Amino acid sequence: GGGSGGLDEGLDDYDPDYPLDPGLEEALVSSKLDAIFTEYNTLLTSQLDSQRRYFEGMMSTMQAEKDGLLSAAAAAEQQAAVIASAVSETREAQRGLKDAHKAIDGHLGKIAKLSEEKEFLKQLNETLLSNTKQYKVQLKQAEEASTSQLKAKDATIHDLEEQVRDLMVYLDAQTKIAEATRE
């Protein structure tokens, strides 16, 4: 980034497989914006101090001329030095502001991407929750159907066992009758 090395720290560590907690993500974004705001204020303060020094220098020069302490040439030379210094400081402050604006734009782009990804993950989560509810309903229906089929099969098995028992009694009785008639 531009004027500060600390503004970009942490943003490149984002891992899409382990999304940030929304509260943590919001705190991170807020922290980054606070840092950018602080840097912007520092640059603005620097610019205002530069302007204050320029005008104080001009006032000092004018006061010196008024009091007749400096010759016109010396006053002009001092004014030129004050102006040159102010121009230099202004250019430096403008470069700093330009860098800060680039950093802000970069962070805003990252924030927008993270917001899009957060919205996508939120929708995906809602879809998964909806699917889970549907699968639970289907599973319950399948379990109920299975239980009903098991009860029907148990009843059929019980009925068949009774028929086999009755048949065994009948065959046993037939065998005894046959033996009794032979004797």
Image (cartoon, helix red, strand yellow):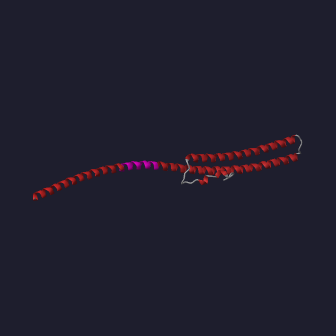
Q: Is residue 69 left or right of residue 105?
A: right
Q: From the viewer's perspective, is residue 62 above or below residue 121?
A: above
Q: From the viewer's perspective, is residue 155 above or below residue 68?
A: below
Quadrant of residue 45 within the rendered picture: top right
The prevailing secondary structure element of the residues shown in magenta is helix
Residue at the limit of the structure toward the bottom, as seen here: 182
Q: Is residue 12 left or right of residue 171?
A: right
Query: Which residue sits at x=20%, y=53%?
Result: 166
Query: Which residue sits at x=79%, y=44%?
Result: 53
Q: Is residue 73 left or right of residue 96?
A: right
Residue at the limit of the structure toward the front, as seen here: 183
Query: Which residue sits at x=11%, y=57%?
Result: 180
Q: Is residue 164 magenta?
A: no
* Residue 28 image position (x, y, % from top left): 60, 48
Q: Which of 143/54 is in front?
A: 143
* Residue 138 image position (x, y, % from top left): 38, 49
Q: Which of 149/97 is in front?
A: 149
Q: Is residue 36 left or right of residue 88?
A: left
Q: Which of 69/103 is in front?
A: 103
* Residue 146 image position (x, y, % from top left): 33, 51
Q: Is residue 141 magenta?
A: yes
Q: Which residues are magenta?
A: 128-142
Q: Please state the total of marks drawn on the protein image.
A: 0
Position of the C terminus by quadrant: bottom left
